[in-house]
Amino acid sequence: MITAAQMRAARALLGIDQKTLAELSGLSIPTIQRMESSSGNVRGVVESLTRVITALELAGIELIGEGAASPAGGRGVRLKSSSTTS
């Protein structure tokens, strides 16, 4: 799973716009826009989600799930759980 916030953050880390992500993933710009406007987990066709995740990973993004460790040890950004942000 990937959240809309993760997609936007991944693009920001890569310094790419929605058009570039659409090209990298072989999807349309409206599809990327729709995915990024989701609330919470991105909803969509599984194949489209897979294409976006693959494109981001090939571009150097490591998607980190809730509570998962980052074994690669590279730089990154992670949201704190809501109980620790207050």
Image (cartoon, grey):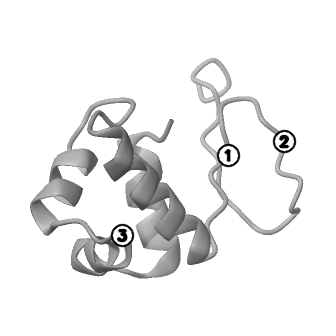
Q: Separation of disc 2 and disc 3 at Cα?
A: 26 Å
Q: Quadrant of residue 33?
A: bottom left
Q: Residue at x 57, y 23 (%)?
A: 82
State the SS at label 3: helix
Q: Amino acid at mark 1?
A: Ile
Q: Is residue 54 above or below residue 78?
A: below
Q: Which residue is label 3 attached to? A: 25
Q: Which residue is label 1 attached to? A: 64
Q: Residue at x 50, y 78 (%)?
A: 14
Q: Is residue 29 above or below residue 2?
A: below
Q: For the image shown, how many numbered marks are present on the structure?
A: 3
Residue 74 x/y as whole percent: 82, 68
**Residue found at the very far left of the displayed protein:** 30
Which of marks 3 and 1 precedes in the sequence? 3
Which of marks 3 and 2 precedes in the sequence? 3
Q: Which residue is label 2 attached to? A: 69
Crowding around mark 2 (Cα neighbors within 10 Å: few <14, some 14 to 19, many 20+) is few
Q: Separation of disc 1 and disc 2 at Cα?
A: 7 Å
